[in-house]
C-alpha cells in the first residue's frame, strides 16, 4: 500500500464512527438505515453467488438509469449471474422491486462495503466477481486497488465529472490518479466529461505513458436510452381518470427537496387564479419527507390526499405521491412536469424520464448534475429552465394554456432523446472486450 493510500485509509477509519452515527441518526426517520449494517463492512451472508458480473449503482437515480443496461447485460450474458450493489435503503428497495422474480436466482443484491481494506477484501472474497461495472462517478482507492490485485476487469460506466468535482479531485492528484490507474476503461457520458477525466488522470505527471484513448472514451449517456412501454402510459391515464379526476389538468412536482416544496406551493397558488381546477401532484424525493410535505400542504390550507391512503382525489387540490417506484405513473398522469432538486441548490434530477413519457418539462436553474442535458434541452426547445417560483408559474401557465406549445415541446423532446441514444450498446461493446476474452480463455 502506498503512503498516500495509507494516509487515506487512516482517515477513513477515523471517519467510520461518524458515518455510523449518521446512519443511526437517519434511522430515526427511516429505520432501514440501521439494518444490514454488517454488509457495509463486507459481511455478506444472504447471497451464494460466485463469479457474477458486478454492477454498482450508488442510489435510486443511478440504479433506475442503469436498469436498461443491466437487463441488456443479462440478455447478452445469460450464463452469468448479476450482482447489484447500492449504498442506500431506497436504492436497495428499488433493486428488490424491479428484479423481484430474479433475486436469489439470476440476480443477487447487497450493499457496497465501506472503502476499508478488510471490508473490501471480505466482499470480494465472498462474491468473486468476474467483472466490475461502477455506474456514474464513484472513485474508491482501496476498492479499486483490491479489484486490480485480483485481476478483475474494472469499468466506470456513464461516468460524469463536473468542473467542480474535477477541481475537488485535483486537490489529491496522486491518490486519485493511482485509483484510476486500476480502471480498465472509463465510459464517459460526453466529450466534456471525457476531457475532464483525461485531465484528472494524466495531469500532474500521474500515469505517464498510458494511452488516453484506451483509458477514456465518450460512449454517451445511458439515461437517453430509456424506453417507455405503452402499458405504462396507459396505466398513468387510467390512474388519472380513476384517482385524480378525468379532464382535470395536473402539474406534477417530481423529486422535490426541503425548501423547494414551499416554492412549488407558491407557484401553484399563482396558477390557481387562472386554472382553479388545477391539481398539484407532489412527489418528495426522500420517503422520510412524505409526512412532512403533507403537513406543509395542509398548513397552507390545502386539502390533501396521499397515494398510500388509497382514496380518490377527484375533488382535492393536492395529491402526495408517497410511494416509491411510481414516478413514470405520475408523469403519465400529468399535463406538465416540474423536475425538483432544481429550485434549491441540489443539482437537479433526471428530466429525460418525463420527456420519454411525453409530458412537457420545466426545471429550475440549479441543474449542475445535468448541466449539458439542461443546456441542450433549452437550445432545442425541449424543455424550460426557470429561476424561481414566479417563472415556474408563468411557464406552467403557458404550457397549460397552449396545446400547440405543449405538443411542440414534447415532439422536440422525443427527437432530442432519439438523437442521443446508443450509450448502452457502446458500453456493452467495451465490457465485451473483457468478458468475451475471459470466456475464450
Image (cartoon, rainbow, N blue to C red):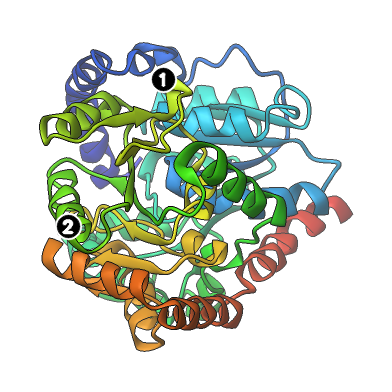
Mark 1 burial class by Cα count in 10 Å: few <14, some 14-19, many 20+:
many
| Residue at numbered disc 2 | 267
Q: Answer with left or right where residue 430 lies relative to residue 363.
A: right
Can residue 138 be seen here?
yes
Q: Position of residue 264 (x, y in %)?
A: 19, 51
Q: Is residue 89 left or right of residue 211?
A: left
Residue 240: x and y in percent read 52, 45
Q: Nearer the viewer, residue 103 or 357?
A: 357
- 256 vs 320, nearest the viewer: 320
Is 15 displayed left or right of 82 in the figure? left
> Looking at the image, can residue 149 be seen?
no
Residue sitting at 48 percent across and 47 percent down? 330
Contact, mark 1 vs mark 2 (Cβ under 8 Å)? no
Per the model, the C-alpha gap separating discs 1 and 2 is: 45 Å
> Which secondary structure, mark 2?
helix
Number of marks: 2
Q: Which residue is mark 1?
A: 41
Q: Nearer the viewer, residue 397 or 195?
A: 397
Tell me the quarter of the picture where residue 291 sits: top left
Q: Residue at x 19, y 17 (%)?
A: 25
Q: Secondary structure at mark 1?
A: helix
Looking at the rendered image, the disc whose residue lies closer to the viewer, 1 or 2, is: 2
Quadrant of the image occupied by residue 222: bottom right
Q: Work out whether mark 1 precedes mark 2 in sequence or the reverse, and give the earlier one.
A: 1
Q: Is residue 224 left or right of residue 385?
A: right
How many C-alpha atoms fall within 10 Å of the one at disc 2: few (<14), some, or many (≥20)?
A: some
Position in image of residue 45 (x %, y %): 59, 11
Query: Percent position (x, y) of residue 322?
Result: 38, 30
The picture quadrant where one finds residue 391 is bottom left
Residue located at (76% from left, 36% from top):
81
Amino acid at each position: 500500500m502506498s503512503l498516500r493510500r495509507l494516509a487515506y485509509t487512516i482517515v477513513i477509519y477515523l471517519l467510520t464512527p461518524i458515518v455510523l452515527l449518521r446512519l443511526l441518526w437517519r434511522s430515526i426517520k427511516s429505520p432501514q438505515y440501521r439494518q444490514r449494517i454488517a454488509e457495509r463492512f463486507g459481511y455478506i451472508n444472504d447471497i451464494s453467488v460466485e463469479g457474477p458480473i458486478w454492477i454498482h449503482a450508488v442510489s435510486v437515480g443511478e440504479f433506475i438509469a442503469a436498469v436498461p443496461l443491466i437487463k441488456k447485460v443479462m440478455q447478452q450474458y445469460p450464463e452469468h449471474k448479476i450482482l447489484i450493489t447500492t449504498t442506500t435503503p431506497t436504492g436497495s428497495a428499488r433493486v428488490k422491486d424491479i428484479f423481484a422474480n430474479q433475486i436469489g436466482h439470476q440476480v443477487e443484491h447487497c450493499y457496497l462495503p465501506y472503502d476499508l481494506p478488510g471490508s473490501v477484501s471480505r466482499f470480494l472474497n465472498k462474491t468473486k466477481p468476474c467483472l466490475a461495472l461502477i455506474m456514474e462517478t464513484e472513485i474508491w482507492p482501496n476498492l479499486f486497488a483490491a479489484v486490480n490485485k485480483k485481476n478483475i476487469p474494472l469499468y466506470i460506466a456513464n461516468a460524469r465529472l463536473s468542473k467542480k468535482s474535477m477541481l475537488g479531485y485535483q486537490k489529491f492528484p496522486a491518490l486519485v490518479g493511482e485509483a484510476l490507474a486500476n480502471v480498465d476503461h472509463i465510459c464517459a457520458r460526453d466529450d466534456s466529461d471525457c476531457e475532464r477525466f483525461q485531465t484528472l488522470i494524466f495531469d500532474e505527471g500521474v500515469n505517464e505513458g498510458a494511452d488516453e484513448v484506451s483509458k477514456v472514451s465518450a460512449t454517451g449517456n445511458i439515461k437517453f436510452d430509456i424506453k417507455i412501454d405503452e402499458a405504462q402510459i396507459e396505466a398513468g391515464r387510467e390512474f388519472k381518470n380513476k384517482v385524480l379526476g378525468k379532464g382535470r389538468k395536473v402539474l406534477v412536482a417530481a423529486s422535490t427537496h426541503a425548501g423547494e416544496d414551499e416554492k412549488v406551493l407558491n407557484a401553484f397558488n399563482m396558477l390557481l387564479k387562472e386554472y382553479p381546477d388545477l391539481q398539484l401532484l407532489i412527489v418528495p424525493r426522500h420517503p422520510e419527507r412524505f409526512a412532512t410535505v403533507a403537513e406543509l400542504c395542509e398548513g397552507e390550507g390545502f386539502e390533501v390526499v396521499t397515494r398510500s391512503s388509497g382514496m380518490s382525489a377527484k375533488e382535492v387540490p393536492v395529491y402526495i405521491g408517497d410511494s416509491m417506484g411510481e414516478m413514470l405513473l405520475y408523469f403519465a398522469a400529468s399535463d406538465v412536469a416540474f423536475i425538483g432538486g432544481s429550485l434549491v441548490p441540489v443539482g437537479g434530477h433526471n428530466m429525460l424520464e418525463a420527456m420519454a413519457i411525453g409530458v412537457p418539462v420545466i426545471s429550475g436553474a440549479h441543474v449542475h448534475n445535468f448541466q449539458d442535458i439542461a443546456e441542450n434541452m433549452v437550445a432545442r426547445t425541449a424543455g424550460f429552465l426557470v429561476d424561481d417560483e414566479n417563472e415556474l408559474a408563468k411557464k406552467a401557465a403557458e404550457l397549460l394554456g397552449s396545446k400547440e406549445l405543449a405538443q411542440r415541446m414534447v415532439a422536440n423532446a422525443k427527437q432530442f432523446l432519439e438523437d442521443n441514444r446508443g450509450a448502452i450498446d457502446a458500453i456493452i461493446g467495451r465490457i465485451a472486450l473483457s468478458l468475451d476474452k475471459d470466456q475464450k480463455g
